[in-house]
Image (tube, rainbow, N blue to C red):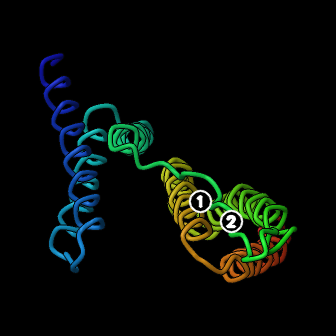
Amino acid sequence: MQDSFYFVAGLASVFAFAGIFSLYSAWSSKGAQPLRSWLGWAMLVLSAVGWSLAVGTEFGISIAALIVMLGVFALLAVRGEWPSGPRPIEKQRSGGVSEPGALRQLWLRGILRFLSATFLPLVSGIVAGLLFFGFTGLSDSWRLVGGAFVSVTIWTLAVVWVCADKKLLRPSAGLLAFSVLSGLMLKLAIPAVAA
């Protein structure tokens, strides 16, 4: 029994790292690689299924997500592809700085993006999990696990959207609208359920 646990857990970890490498190689290549991308996503799903078989659904999905996060962090650390900081301010021909407030504006945009990537995805993920828990007719354990999975998934996708989109207003407005509409749905549904 113990040997089968280590075998399934090891195989699930191998699937996770293979999926990370497959997605990274597909996204870093110049041409479109849909087959490699789908293969990477399939391996990540197999990793979550393997961990769920080894330790149960409640812990398996969380362990699989944690391994993916650690694997991505290790890959970025090994590759050395970290943000290099703000670009140097270009000087005018006269020798002066072209925009005296350029660095301040860059810092302000960075702080706004950090706040948007921190709070808005968190609220969106929690509200999405509450919506799944409140509006599905499954058993309590399935609703709890499903709500946690939906919450983490929406949270992760929202963080990626905020960080990847060049226009900060678009993801911020989208996530804010999603959170407000979902909150209104919950507020209208809670009295109906309580009654």
State the residue position of label 2. Answer: 124
Residue drawn at 65 percent across, 81 percent down: 167
Mark 1 Cα shell of 10 Å, populated few (<14), some (14-19), many (≥20): many
Contact flag, marks 2 and 1 (Cβ < 8 Å): yes
SS state under label 2: helix
Amino acid type at circle 2 is Ser
The residue furthest front is 94
* Residue toward you, 145 or 137: 145
* x, y percent for residue 8: 17, 33
State which quadrant residue 13 falls in.
top left
Image quarter of the N terminus: top left
State which quadrant residue 135 falls in.
bottom right
State the residue position of label 1. Answer: 155
Residue drawn at 73 percent across, 81 percent down: 169
Image quarter of the C terminus: bottom right
Quick check: 5 left or right of 77?
Answer: left
Q: How far apart are marks 2 and 1 (CA)?
A: 7 Å
* Residue toward you, 66 or 160: 160
* x, y percent for residue 108: 82, 63
Amino acid type at circle 1 is Trp
Mark 2 Cα shell of 10 Å, populated few (<14), some (14-19), many (≥20): many
